[in-house]
Image: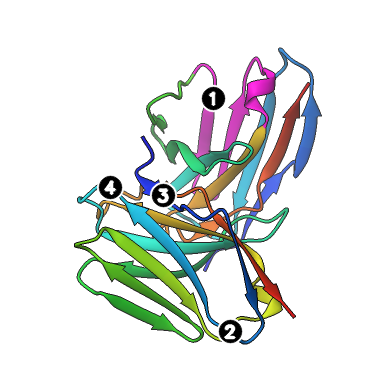
């Protein structure tokens, strides 16, 4: 199993600003994933973060808007850049044990 | 294009009865399916999975059934307990990709 923590748990941000979300895992994992859950919607994969290489983004998501870092095998960050109200979502990280473990999520509200 | 669909946004069941949550998919390449439970303010928690080589998988009170010809899977919870009240998501992937496509969720309420 894996225990995943995320910071912050929630935040309220102004339009045009950026927020960096941290994800910490209690064990070394090869792949980490970032998801978004917009209000009333399903979880959507944003990107896959591998240590030592650039993140792989899914269709509709770009690095300029959602830059990701993966400095080691237990940690990753997702930045939501130049935020607009449409970015208001829950952002979750998960790890690669067949996608079974998710962090508690970061609830972001953009005013 | 919603490849994984949960057509019932909510479901209410009496405690002790069976809860049946349904999920349909359109992509015949999906070969691995999972169910997650999500409480408010928490991340999804893995419940049970099934590979396309099987049509049934059990784990305690939870059983997942897969009907590949109908592209349908269901989660049965027997007996249902108030602590089972949560949002349930099904997810699907094509083998080895680790890329999961999620349904929109079904909110289950188990009434005491």
Disc 3 with disc 1 on a shared chain: no
Q: Which residue is mark 1?
A: A66
Q: A28 or B104, which lies in front?
A: B104
Q: Which residue is mark 4?
A: B26
Disc 4: host chain: B
* B11 relative to B51 in the view: left or right: right
Name above or below for residue B16 compared with residue A65. below
First in sequence: mark 4 vs mark 3: 3
Give the quarter of the figure containing the N terminus of chain B.
top left
Q: How many numbered circles are shown?
A: 4
On the image, the x and y values in percent for residue B106 come to: 55, 57
Disc 3: host chain: B
- How far apart marks 3 and 1 lie (CA) works out to 27 Å
Disc 1: host chain: A
| Circle 3 crowding by C-alpha within 10 Å: few under 14, some 14–19, many from 20 | many
Label 4 with label 3: CB-CB less than 8 Å: yes
- How far apart marks 3 and 2 lie (CA) works out to 24 Å
Extent of the magenta region: A64-88
On the image, the x and y values in percent for residue B62 come to: 48, 79
Question: Of helix, strand and loop, which one carries label 2?
Answer: loop
Q: Which residue is mark 3?
A: B5
- How far apart marks 4 and 2 lie (CA) works out to 30 Å
Residue B37: quarter of image: bottom right
Mark seen at residue B17? 2
- How far apart marks 4 and 1 lie (CA) works out to 29 Å
């Amino acid at each position: 199993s894996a225990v995943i923590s995320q910071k912050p748990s929630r935040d309220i941000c102004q339009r045009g600003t950026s927020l960096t979300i941290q994800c910490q895992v209690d064990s070394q994992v090869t792949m980490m994933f970032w998801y978004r859950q917009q209000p009333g919607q399903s979880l959507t994969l944003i990107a896959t973060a591998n240590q030592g290489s650039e993140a792989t983004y899914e269709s509709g998501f770009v690095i300029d808007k959602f830059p990701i870092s993966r400095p080691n095998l237990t940690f990753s960050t997702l930045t939501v850049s130049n935020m607009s109200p449409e970015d208001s979502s829950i952002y979750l990280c998960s790890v690669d044990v067949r996608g079974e473990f998710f962090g508690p999520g970061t609830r972001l509200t953009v005013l | 294009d919603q490849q994984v669909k949960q057509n019932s946004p909510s479901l209410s069941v009496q405690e002790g009865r069976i809860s049946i949550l349904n999920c349909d998919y359109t992509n015949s390449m999906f070969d691995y399916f999972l169910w997650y439970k999500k409480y408010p303010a928490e991340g999804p928690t893995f419940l049970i999975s099934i590979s396309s080589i099987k049509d049934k998988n059990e784990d305690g009170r939870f059983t997942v059934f897969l009907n590949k010809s109908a592209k349908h899977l269901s989660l049965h919870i027997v007996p249902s307990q108030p602590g089972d009240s949560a949002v349930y998501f099904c997810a699907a992937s094509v083998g080895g990709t680790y890329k999961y496509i999620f349904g929109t969720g079904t909110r289950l309420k188990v009434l005491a």
